[in-house]
Structures are given as structure tokens and as C-alpha cells.
Amino acid sequence: MYEEVECPYCKVYVEINPDEHYKKIQAYECPECEKNFEVLAETHISYSSCGMADCLNGGEHKWERIIRSPFIRFKGKYRCKDCSAEHTVKDEKATQAEWDLYYNRDIEGA
């Protein structure tokens, strides 16, 4: 089942096959403007969303801190706001002492 999505750069409709990457993000190149953009396909509800990803076209990534639980596991991890790329800053990762404190607190609280 093919579907058309609008290129976020030039607004031309691009044909995609959401079955090829169900529930995954995949980059496509617009045949008109030749810029790359990402598409998230949800085939079971026949819905796809796409957005500009300048970092796929030679631009800079826009890193945002990943905030999830437990916080210690995601400390120092970043995800690009525009694409699905992830980056870890080693100097910001949790130290062994922080992990020990985290596990000891869980054991004592149980």
C-alpha cells in the first residue's frame, strides 16, 4: 500500500511505502528538491508524519537531552530534535558512584 506525503521543504508529494518501515523512522529524498526528510509510518492507522531534517542535508544536529525514567540511565544522552540520531556525551554519563547510590537506594526502599 503506497501513500503520498508532502515534502516539508518544497511541498511536492512524494510516494512512500509505509509497509517497508512500519513503526520505524526512515529517511526519504525528495525527487523534486533533492532534500532528505524523515517519515514515521503507522500502517495500521494509515497515517504518516514527516518533517524537515536539515541535519540530513548537511546542516547541524539540534541536540536535546533525553529525559526518561530512570533518569540515571539517560544521563548524558541526547537525541536530535529533527532526526532520529542519538549522541552520548561521555563526560556527562553517570559515574559508578552514582549507579551504586541509585541501586542502594532501590534496595533500601524495597
Image: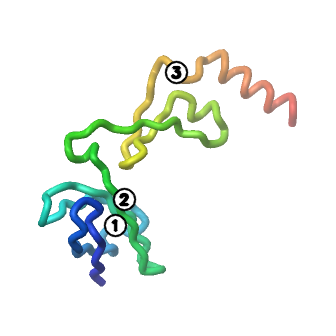
Disc 3 marks which residue?
92
Location of residue 65 in the rendering, given as x and y in whole percent from the top left corner: 52, 35
Vertical placement of residue 10 versus 97, above or below: below
Q: Secondary structure at mark 1?
A: helix
Q: Which mark's residue is nearer the viewer, 1 or 3?
A: 3
Quarter of the image where the C terminus is located: top right
Q: Residue at x 41, y 77 (%)?
A: 43
Q: Secondary structure at mark 2?
A: strand
Left or right of 67, for residue 61: left
**Mark 1 Cα-neighbour bin, 10 Å: few <14, some 14–19, many ≥20:** some
- Residues 79 and 60: in front is 60
Disc 1 marks which residue?
21
Q: Residue furthest front?
A: 10
Q: Residue at x 36, y 49 (%)?
A: 83
Location of residue 81 in the rendering, given as x and y in whole percent from the top left corner: 42, 45
Task: Say which quarter of the image contains residue 18.
Answer: bottom left
| Residue type at numbered disc 1 | His
Task: Say which quarter of the image contains residue 62.
Answer: top left
Q: Residue at x 72, y 26 (%)?
A: 102
| Residue type at numbered disc 2 | Ile
**Disc 1 to disc 2: CB gap under 8 Å:** yes
Left or right of 97, for residue 45: left
Location of residue 85 in the rendering, given as x and y in whole percent from the top left corner: 37, 43
| Residue type at numbered disc 3 | Glu
**Disc 2 to disc 3: CB gap under 8 Å:** no
Circle nearer the N terminus (2, 3) = 2
Vertical placement of residue 38 versus 44, above or below: above
Q: Secondary structure at mark 3?
A: helix
Disc 2 marks which residue?
25
Vertical placement of residue 49 versus 19, above or below: above
> Which numbered marker is on residue 99?
none
**Disc 1 to disc 3: CB gap under 8 Å:** no
